[in-house]
Amino acid sequence: MGIDELDGRLIVLLAREPRIGVLEASRRLGVARGTVQARLDRLQSSGVIRGFGPQVDPTALGYPVTAFATLEIKQGQGADVRAHLNGVPEVLELHTTTGHGDMLCRLVARSNADLQRVIDRVVGFEGIVRASTAIVMENPVPLRIIPLVEQAAEDDSRA
Amino acid sequence: MGIDELDGRLIVLLAREPRIGVLEASRRLGVARGTVQARLDRLQSSGVIRGFGPQVDPTALGYPVTAFATLEIKQGQGADVRAHLNGVPEVLELHTTTGHGDMLCRLVARSNADLQRVIDRVVGFEGIVRASTAIVMENPVPLRIIPLVEQAAEDDSRA
DNA sequence: GTCATCCTGGGCAGTTTGTACAGCCAAACA
DNA sequence: TGTTTGGCTGTACAAACTGCCCAGGATGAC
């Protein structure tokens, strides 16, 4: 279920230089091309690598403002709220969390003023009792996975 | 700075079927291959598309538990805390937010028990005054960008 | 000892990429 | 109105890559 050291190196390599193909990757890793192909196939079918979709930057799309909203939901309204939020494009992700039967969602907006519109749309729904929003100022650690992959590969090699 | 309707269709297509190449994309979109290549180059150099790195699933790596931690930082310790958290592999992202000079970070762990270890490591640092953690139970809306891309493309076509 | 698994190294046909170039069209501009 | 600029099309060609196949060797499990 885990990944070994070669898997780890392969993922890190692909993360750093996504444009290289299987052949080039095999050269960099010092293994046969067939090996890289087999590893990649396995990593994808096992779900470790979900895909190679484009990583789009909301800022460059015209949505430079990010915020996290904590929502308090009325009992039994979870499904409705999920459907509601799913229909809002500015909601980039949504989680249900422990605590107060709450939800946490990530929002983007075109400006601070626009954020108000987004929040109004998000909370303008019957099942939502209360919302508190935290606007992101800096992003010192952008979403990353490489350190975790290296950790997982290292754990494997010791197992 | 924005994207037009063709850009939008291209990004959505690549997000849905990342394995297709430029040639196949041009066929699907009904435009010349050179056009797709030019659009892709522009989208990448303008930063709208940051890359095509592998999307790794922490769950499949052996880290099925996700949590969000809100951290309260001692005045003037921001830089140190950032450096500290940057060194923790289980910290997948970190934001500074409005509110109480706080930070919000996304964590993963191998189990609920392991989460305790991660949290201890995260908060075991002088500059962090207090931390509150919300464990993710469900993820009704996984991180997504397609609806926003469609919205941005639509806004453009009306502008 | 034998089997299953994985990696290697090689080969082959088909396809894609990178790059270039000429023609066409529409919008902007003098 | 005449011209220029920018973007798209269609085509071309060499180089490179992919998908797929196979036989041999090494390793670890039973």
Image (spheres, coloured by chain):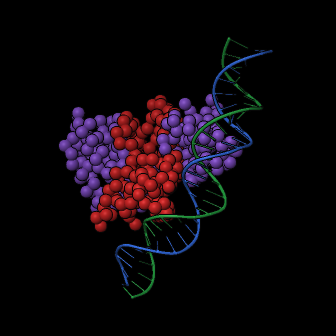
Chain colours: A red, B purple, C green, D blue
The residue depicted at 50 percent of the width and 55 percent of the height is A23
The residue depicted at 23 percent of the width and 43 percent of the height is B128
* Relative depth, front residue between C26 and B76: C26
Q: Can you tell which quarter of the image residue C11 is in?
A: bottom right
Q: Position of residue B46 (x, y in %)?
A: 51, 34
* Relative depth, front residue between B93 and A105: B93
Quadrant occupied by the N terminus of chain A: bottom left
The residue depicted at 26 percent of the width and 49 percent of the height is B122
Quadrant occupied by the C terminus of chain A: bottom left
Q: Position of residue B63 (x, y in %)?
A: 36, 59
Q: Is residue A16 left or right of residue D2?
A: left
Q: Is residue B72 visible?
A: no
Q: Position of residue A99 (x, y in %)?
A: 35, 53
* Relative depth, front residue between B4 and B111: B4
Q: Is residue B74 visible?
A: yes
Image: A88 above or below C5 = above
